Image (cartoon, helix red, strand yellow):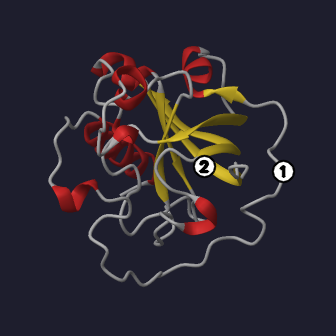
């Protein structure tokens, strides 16, 4: 399979998973999935996680709406958009626009998975999420889980500097080169 076909398949899988509905079972609702011990297969690139947010970031929705946003970009958002925003066994996650409100924000309820944005209409969710991946020299996602690394977790605010790897039909895939995870004060 060629690289373009792999990207299309990955974008399709992530987009399909992003459209999953509310009401996961208790085990799926936990950040990080099943809690099983995962053995990383690949190492993350040195310098991937940075202490300062790369300058010039724009929101996910703004970048997706800008058809000219290709090549190098800097995007800011929250990890989320589905119950499990991290892909198990791959350095891939879903990034949601910070302008979206979670069900807990909208209703003040005790939603167990507020990062899935299940109260957001599907077309709006699709327009305001992007797939971020960390790839090897051949452009394939690294075989390593990202959930819990360097503060990455559902609803964590991150700024990603990288390159648009794939864009069509409303999907946007970004190859990350730098990631800044916003640390909460307190």
Q: From this viewpoint, is residue 72 visible?
A: no
CB under 8 Å between discs 1 and 2: no
Residue, disc 2: 175
Q: Mark 1 or mark 2, which has the lower sequence index?
A: 1
The answer to which of 84 and 13 lies nearer the viewer is 84
Question: x and y percent of residue 179 in the render?
Answer: 69, 53
Residue sitting at 63 percent across and 72 percent down?
Answer: 44
Q: Residues within 10 Å of mark 1 (few under 14, many from 20)?
A: few
| Left or right: residue 84 compared with residue 160 | left
Residue sitting at 14 percent across and 53 percent down?
Answer: 25
Vertical side of 125 occupied by 9: above or below: below
Label 1 SS:
loop
Question: x and y percent of residue 134 in the render?
Answer: 58, 58
Q: From this viewpoint, is residue 97 visible?
A: yes
Q: Residues within 10 Å of mark 2 (few under 14, many from 20)?
A: many
The answer to which of 54 and 66 lies nearer the viewer is 54
Vertical side of 116 occupied by 184: above or below: below
| Left or right: residue 162 compared with residue 130 | right
The N terminus, quarter of image: bottom left
Residue sitting at 73 percent across and 49 percent down?
Answer: 185
| Left or right: residue 36 compared with residue 160 | left
The image quarter in which residue 119 lies: top left
Residue, disc 1: 52
| Left or right: residue 82 compared with residue 140 | left
Vertical side of 62 occupied by 98: above or below: below
């Amino acid at each position: 399979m060629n690289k373009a076909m792999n990207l299309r398949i990955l974008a399709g899988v992530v987009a399909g998973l992003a459209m999953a509905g509310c009401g996961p079972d208790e085990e799926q609702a936990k950040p990080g999935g099943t809690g099983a011990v995962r053995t990383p297969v690949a190492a993350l690139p040195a310098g991937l996680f940075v202490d300062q947010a790369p300058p010039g970031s724009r929101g996910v929705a703004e970048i997706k709406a800008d058809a000219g946003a290709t090549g190098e970009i800097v995007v800011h958002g929250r990890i989320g958009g589905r119950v499990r925003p991290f892909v198990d066994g791959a350095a891939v996650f879903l990034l949601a626009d910070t302008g979206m409100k979670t069900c807990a924000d909208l209703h003040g309820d005790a939603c167990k998975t507020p990062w899935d944005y299940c109260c957001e209409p599907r077309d709006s969710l699709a327009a305001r999420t992007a797939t971020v991946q960390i790839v090897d020299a051949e452009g394939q996602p690294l075989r390593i889980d990202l959930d819990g690394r360097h503060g990455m977790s559902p609803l964590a605010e991150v700024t990603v500097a990288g390159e648009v790897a794939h864009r069509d039909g409303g999907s946007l895939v970004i190859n990350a080169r730098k990631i800044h995870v916003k640390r909460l004060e307190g």
